[in-house]
Amino acid sequence: MRLLLAALLSLLGATPAAAQAPALSVEVRRAGDVWTAELELPRSARAWVFARSPLTEHGSRPWRQPGWTVETPGVRIERRGFHDVLVGANGRPVPRRVRIRFTPTPERMAGDYDPSLVFSDGAVALYSRQFDAFPTDDLAAIPRFRPGGNLPWSTARVRYRDRAGPVLAGGVRSAVATVVSEGEGGYILFGGSAPVVTPTLALVVDPQLPAWLRTGIAEATPAMLARYTEALGPWPGGRPTIMVSWAGPTSGMSSMGGGSLRGLIVMRFEGEGILVESAAARHSNLWFIAHEAAHFWLGQAVTYESARDGWITEGGADLLAFRAVAAADPGYDPLAPLQSAVDDCVRLSAGRAIAAANERGEHRAYYACGAVFALVAEASSGRPFTAFVRSLIDANRADGVVSRGEWLALLTQVSGEPTLARDMGRMIDRGAADPKAAIAALFTRAGVRFEAGPDGVPRLR
């Protein structure tokens, strides 16, 4: 799961002062069970807006308000539009120094990285970009700042300290870790044992994780990385780190979540449904590893130009993972998850632009429709999708960015059929009045094997 937010001046009401905001400084400390963040704001403003303010996956609630308490008098935290905001009392500016006491939340976020990973042995990993914020004096403009849009970003320089001992950042333990906001950020680990280091990865695993999962992750991940390296070329990042947390055997639940960042895969497991190994759980775990490992190439070796193009990396990583798991386990049938992608793309593109899915909270559209588009690229080229991805990487090594135009141009090149790119572009920009027919037409011209179901939805064969 990799949903980057753009770092450009907002076209939706940003003020020049907000656009030029210098970096803020943050000091994060853990002292036993007490967590604090001291913010040193570089300028006075009526509000400071937290750029990363996703809602929880379950319940669609803001996550900061329950666990963050502003201890500085005259400041409160509230929700305005799509963002959590620090505001001064009675319209006064926010003081230049703000102290926040917080409790790391283990909840999963919708369409963004979880702010915390909480391990059963007391270790906690904090997502580094949760403190990014920008100032504004125009409170009425705040609801117009949209996630994934061109926000007036302010970078943060964050220092992490733990009274109990060194923290782990970038695979290295130190008494103080200083992280400057850039790219996707990462996770800083407080406490816990030293990672298990092999020639191909560093592994931090919750000690209570079911044994079959621990063994499977340790065995499957190097194999997946080797498979991708052979097909896509060397990953330009050295030894990756994997952090795996366990939220416990919650009744009636079977959950695997997480995402990938630069040189890091984070995984979060929960539920009684994965205590015992089954074919379904094994396949789900293999797919998860394969999807996140795919992002080292389609997401890190190259990424997309704008969050509106998330279908390039998310749908592409899905198809890479479906193919990789099928190659690793003959008992896995990729047609079932691919059909789910077709079904969801039909539902989520009906009269709705795929590019704007993040604004609607319909992040699934990037995965589903992106996988449909990747399947069209694979079938129309007559080669595995890894060949298409390698061409994207080879052609864009200079800037590391694949634009929507470059992706569609490569599709036309490998397929020899320009109408595929034309019709995909329409779905991306406007959706489709009849997405069933639109996807069927793409499949027919690309050579994807399907038949029309009783409801008109293309059924893959």
Image (spheres, helix red, strand yellow):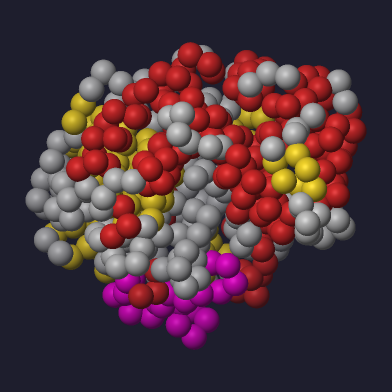
Verify whether residue 16 appears in magenta. Answer: no
Q: Is residue 84 magenta?
A: yes
Q: Name the image quarter holding the C terminus.
A: top right
Residue 281 visible from this viewpoint: yes
Q: Quadrant of residue 282?
A: top left
Name which residue lies at 40% across and 37% down.
Answer: 286
Q: How many marks?
A: 0
**Image coordinates for residue 188, horizontal then vertical, percent:** 29, 45
Residue 339: give x, y in percent of width and height.
64, 46
Work out whether residue 272 or residue 174 is closer to the camera in this orientation and state it: 272
Q: Position of residue 407 (x, y in %)?
A: 73, 30
Residue farthest to the right, as pictured: 419
Furthest residue toward left? 164
Q: Is residue 170 visible?
A: no
Residue placed at 32% from the left, 57% from the top? Answer: 273
Determine whether 90 is above or below 221 in the image: below
Above-or-below relation of 173 to 381: below
x 26%, y 50%: residue: 276
Per the rendered image, the range of residues in magenta is 67-94
Residue 106, placed above or below residue 230: below
Residue 436, x across and y down, in percent: 81, 52
Q: Is residue 24 above or below residue 49?
A: above
Please give the name of the residue rendered at 30% of the width and 21% of the height, measured from the top-left corner: 200
Judge from the rendering whether residue 120 lies leftward or rightward of residue 349; answer left or right. left
